[in-house]
Image (cartoon, rainbow, N blue to C red):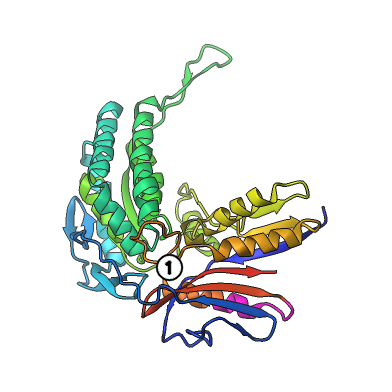
């Protein structure tokens, strides 16, 4: 198939102190024909909405108790809309991980969790799912405030999915069976599934609660105990969820470390496992997923699907369709319609209805995107649509590279 490539990069908010030369300049072109920047200022005076939820849990959760880091250090977790500090969170390090591992090991060796019936474990997990639904508004508000995703997405999709996933994994608890295996001769052969022990887990920043469910749910259902290292950019909802679960088998540590989901981090973890005792490791790493548009495709539908594939969750999705390949016969039509759709994207305060996109998680992503754009050779067109959302923060809603 003769195809041309359209690559899309999602951008984040940046402050007016940004060193880059495209602060509030109105509608303009920059760097000749290579970069076209479109600025909208309709919401420049928009007032920030502060959620009413109280930030009550900022300490490490170890052995069923919220405790300070051994060093006493804390770090700020930031509102990605404004750069303002939401709360100061305990900064765990190696000593705190050791404390959490010892607590998890003791809970596994001496505690009731791995020894209780699978049905009893499932009831605990189902109770947690009920509590998630009861506290859904607080969880959604914290997830939006700390992460930068829209409140509508958090409240109507991700928090319900958190409860649903825990109910799903709870249902597996008493359905994990061994096998009786036919054998030659007078032998009895059977397999038995047992808990592994302490599961060490690293949670990413893009879907803090959904990834919490993906990691914590299966491990608990199988009778393991856990040490969960959460992303330093988005620690608040995991602590809140830990409070709702509050069984000493779940330990949660916040602090700094390699980025979860990255290939480099995966290599490090596999190397550590290989050099110790060949511990079993499961990795979920990010990628660059292709979106392919054929000659006979419904272009309007393809544009909408491609738009969603990239922009969902501010583009912070490991399986985002961030590389679009379009048949050359429909390429020009697709590009024009994709630009028009991106220009219609509604950018603004995450807590307002109808908003499609807010800032990404960290300010550093802004600089990373700039670096990528500046690295492209001359002759490549870069289209930017920018919405000035606040006095201190601007949000770039899309970049289209051709």
**Furthest-top residue in this view:** 186
- Of 168 and 99, the residue lying toward us: 168
What's the magenta region? 370-379
Residue 41 location in percent, x, y? 45, 77
Q: What element carries label 1?
A: loop
Relative horizontal placement of residue 67, taking residue 26 as reference (left or right): left
Quick check: 85 above or below 251?
below
Q: Residue 161 falls in which quadrant of the image?
A: top left
Pointer 1 residue: 359
Along the viewing direction, whichever of 109 and 253 lies nearer the viewer:
253
Q: How crowded is mark 1: few (under 14 residues within 10 Å), some or many (20 or more)?
A: many
Q: Which residue is painted at 37% across and 76% down in the image?
A: 390
* Quadrant housing the C terminus: bottom right
Q: Can residue 234 be seen? A: no
Q: Can residue 107 be seen in this view?
A: yes
**Which SS does the magenta portion mostly show?**
helix
Q: Where is residue 164 in the image (x, y as percent from the top left)?
A: 36, 38
Instruction: Say above or below: 72 vs 356.
Output: below
Q: Which residue lies furthest to the front in this view?
A: 42
Image vertical order of residue 115 relative to residue 372, above or below: above
Residue 156 % position (x, y):
37, 46
In the displayed structure image, the side of residue 402 where residue 272 appears, left or right = left
Give the residue displayed 24% in from the left and 36% down from the top. 127
Q: At 23% from the left edge and 73% from the top edge, which residue is drawn?
A: 73
In the rendered image, residue 219 lying in the magenta stretch gets the answer no
Please state the horizontal and vertical placement of residue 344, each as a whole percent of the image. 53, 63
Task: Please name whichever residue, 200 or 49, is drawn nearer the observer in this view of the structure.
Answer: 49
Q: What residue is drawn where x is 70% and y is 47%?
A: 298
Q: How many labels does the image show?
A: 1
């Amino acid at each position: 198939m003769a195809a041309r490539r359209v690559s899309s990069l999602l951008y984040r908010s940046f402050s007016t102190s940004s060193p880059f030369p495209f602060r509030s300049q109105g509608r303009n072109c920059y760097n000749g024909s290579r970069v076209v920047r479109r600025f909208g200022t309709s919401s420049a005076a928009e007032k920030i909405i502060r959620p009413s939820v109280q930030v009550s849990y900022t300490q490490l959760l170890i052995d069923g108790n919220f405790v300070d880091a051994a060093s006493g250090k804390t770090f700020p977790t930031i509102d990605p809309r404004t750069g303002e500090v939401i709360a100061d969170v305990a900064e765990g390090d190696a000593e705190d991980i050791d404390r959490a591992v010892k607590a998890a090991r003791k809970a596994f060796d001496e505690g009731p969790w791995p020894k209780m019936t699978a049905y009893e474990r499932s009831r605990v997990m189902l109770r947690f799912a009920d509590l998630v639904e009861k506290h859904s508004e607080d969880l959604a508000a914290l997830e939006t405030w700390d992460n930068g995703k829209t409140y509508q997405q958090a409240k109507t999709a991700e928090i319900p999915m958190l409860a649903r996933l825990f109910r799903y994994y709870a249902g597996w608890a008493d359905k994990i069976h061994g096998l009786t295996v036919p054998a030659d001769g007078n032998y009895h052969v059977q397999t038995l599934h047992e808990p592994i022990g302490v599961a060490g887990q690293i949670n990413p920043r893009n879907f803090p609660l959904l990834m919490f469910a993906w990691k914590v749910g299966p491990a608990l259902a199988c009778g393991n105990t856990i040490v969960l290292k959460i992303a330093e950019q988005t620690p608040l909802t995991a602590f809140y969820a830990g409070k709702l679960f509050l069984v000493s088998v779940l330990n949660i540590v916040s602090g700094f470390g390699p980025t979860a989901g990255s290939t480099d981090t995966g290599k490090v973890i596999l190397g550590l496992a290989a050099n110790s005792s060949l511990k079993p490791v499961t990795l979920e790493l990010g990628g660059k997923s292709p979106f392919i548009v054929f000659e006979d495709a419904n272009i309007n539908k393809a544009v909408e699907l491609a738009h969603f594939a990239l922009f969902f969750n501010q583009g912070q999705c490991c399986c985002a369709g961030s590389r679009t390949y379009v048949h050359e016969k429909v390429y020009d039509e697709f590009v024009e319609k994709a630009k028009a759709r991106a220009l219609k994207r509604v950018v603004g305060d995450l807590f307002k209805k109808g908003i499609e996109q807010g800032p990404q998680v960290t300010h550093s992503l802004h600089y990373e995107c700039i670096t990528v754009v500046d690295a492209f050779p001359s002759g490549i067109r870069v289209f930017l649509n920018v919405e000035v959302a606040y006095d201190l923060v601007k949000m770039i809603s899309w970049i289209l590279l051709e």
